[in-house]
Amino acid sequence: MDNNQCETNCENLQTSRVSTENSRVNSCECGSSSSSKNSACCDDTCCSRDPISAAKSLLESSFFTAMKEVHVEKLKKIIEKEWGDTIDKSVELTIKIMAKQWHASLSRTSAEKEFYNGLEKIFKESNKQK
């Protein structure tokens, strides 16, 4: 948790508490308390800097991030096994076609540059004659 964010959230929470005559607030300045992402900013954990609660929150968040990463890796393995040949062929075709497009673009650029330089030379010579 970012200390600056926590300090700001704590200040906002304290301001809200004062304005509601020390009653428990349902939301805080940083967002809705119903949002799981923003609910941590409105609880006392942030303001009291309880390291155990902060670690618990961090570990819970990390668990779901790790779970998602495992799912992605598992899916990648199955996709590679099931569709690997098709994907390989489509990637090879993409590289082949993109290389042709790249070379055509370079040729076009070269021709355009030659045209530009030719026109530039003509106009410069025209100005010298005047």
Image: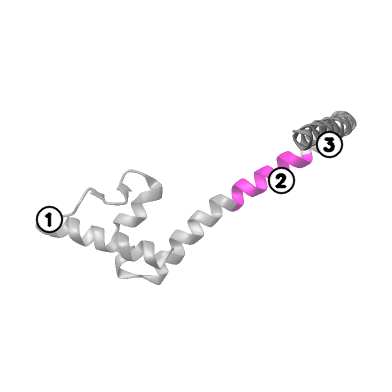
Q: Tell me whether circle 3 and circle 1 mark residues in contact (CB < 8 Å).
A: no
Q: In the image, residue 65 lies at what x, y percent?
A: 57, 51
Q: Which of the pair 110/66 is nearer the observer? A: 110
Please tell me whether residue 71 belongs to the stretch shown in magenta. yes
Element on which disc 2 rests: helix
In the figure, 22 relative to 37: above or below? below
Q: Earlier in the sequence, mark 3 or mark 1?
A: 1
Viewport quadrant of the C terminus: top right
Residue 9 lies in quadrant: bottom left
What's the amino acid at mark 1? Ser
Magenta residue span: 66-77
Q: Residues within 10 Å of mark 3 (few under 14, many from 20)?
A: few
| Helix, strand or loop at mark 3 | helix
Residue at mark 2 = 73
Q: Please indicate whether residue 108 sits to the left or right of residue 54 in the image.
A: right
Q: CA distance from mark 2 to mark 3?
A: 12 Å
Q: Position of residue 30 (x, y in %)?
A: 32, 51
Q: Check disc 2 and give the amino acid type.
A: Glu
Dominant secondary structure of the residues highlighted in magenta in the image? helix
Which mark is drawn over residue 19? 1
Please tell me whether mark 1 sits on a helix, a strand or a loop: helix
Q: Nearer the viewer, residue 32 or 73?
A: 32
**Residue that mark 3 sits on:** 81
Residue 3 higher or lower than 32, as above or below: below
Q: Amino acid at mark 3?
A: Lys
Residue 40 at least partly seen: yes
Indicate which disc, 2 or 3, sits on the residue closer to the N terminus. Answer: 2
On whether residue 115 falls in the magenta region, the answer is: no
Q: Which numbered disc, 3 or 1, marks the residue closer to the eye?
A: 1
User: At which x and y percent is residue 61?
Assistant: 50, 54
Residue in the picture at 71% in, 46% down: 73
